Image (spheres, rainbow, N blue to C red):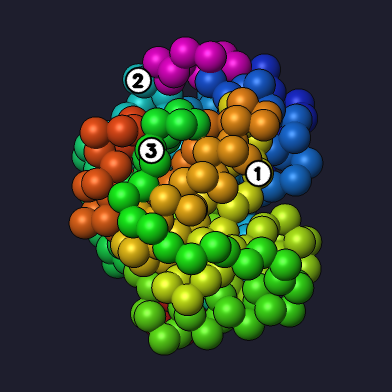
Amino acid sequence: MIRKLTAADRKDVIAMETGIEDDYVIRIFPKLIEQHDMLGYFEGPTLVGIAGMTIYEGEIAVLGRLRTHSNYRGRGIASALMNELKEEAFHSLNLNWACYATEENNIPGNRMARHLQMNLEAIVVSSRISPGTVEGTLDTQPYRSDYSRESKKKYLEEYSVNEDLDFFPHSIYYPLPYVPNLTDGYLDSIEMFQNHSGSFIIMKEEKGATYLHVKVWNERTLHSKELWQIVNAEAEKEARSIWIDLPTEQAKWLEAHSHQTIWHLYGKKKELVK
């Protein structure tokens, strides 16, 4: 049986043997069931699997927080939970996209895409960098940064269409298949920098650690000395780690200067659902 989890299920989530030490899902479980959709798979009274869904910008459901009891793996529990969430996203919530990201070496996570009838949208390399580690190689003009909410919105929408971006690094751990109709709150949380050769965006995020999330759109900007002066100074102010999500080829330059993880982003558009 699959049903939505409630606060009363926390003891069963804690008791479920997953092999994950210090699982953040347990730590923030009350917040998860209050703000997000969390499902549980029960065999009789025993909780044997959980999964959740986070909605971004009212358009995109990101599936995840998948956990299966160690003794019940290989029985289709994970696929059943994720399919239930996908169907809810499209039919109950009327969202445009459902997607999820899994690490490249997560074999079960990558196989699941077939069961969910999802396509590989992008391969994303996430680089975590200590402030001051990267200095850049190209001299570029100073960046202007006094952009209004409307200017940021227009730029992102137009750039995503013109450049046919593989993914949009909406937030840390959550790349999206495209640039959605961003809310005012999100636009206010980002700061855009632009000069004659390109642009980049910075955003402060708290994900267990404090990060400065940098969104870069082309290689010339990525190599800009001026970009790294701005980013390093901003990160050092609050002792933040720098996080950048890039396509595989662009990320190679940062490989020697960062800790990298490779993610596969899978997704399905609502209009393709039969």
According to the picture, the residue beneath numbered tag 2 turns out to be 71
Does the rendering let one see residue 37?
yes
Q: Main secondary structure of the magenta part?
A: loop
- How far is disc 3 from disc 1 in space, using C-alphas? 19 Å
Label 3 with label 2: CB-CB less than 8 Å = no
According to the picture, the residue beneath numbered tag 1 turns out to be 204
Give the label, 3 or 2, closer to the camera.
3
User: For numbered disc 3, what is the local secondary structure?
Assistant: loop
174 is within the stretch colored magenta = no
Start and end of the magenta stretch?
13-22
Give the label, 3 or 1, closer to the camera.
3
Residue 26, horizontal then vertical, whole percent: 62, 22
Instruction: Classify residue 68 by image quadrant.
Output: top left
Amino acid, disc 1:
Lys
Label 1 with label 2: CB-CB less than 8 Å = no
Q: Earlier in the sequence, mark 3 or mark 2?
A: 2
Viewer-proximal residue, 171 or 34?
Answer: 171
Viewer-proximal residue, 155 or 19?
Answer: 155
Residue 47, horizontal then vertical, whole percent: 54, 27
According to the picture, the residue beneath numbered tag 3 turns out to be 134
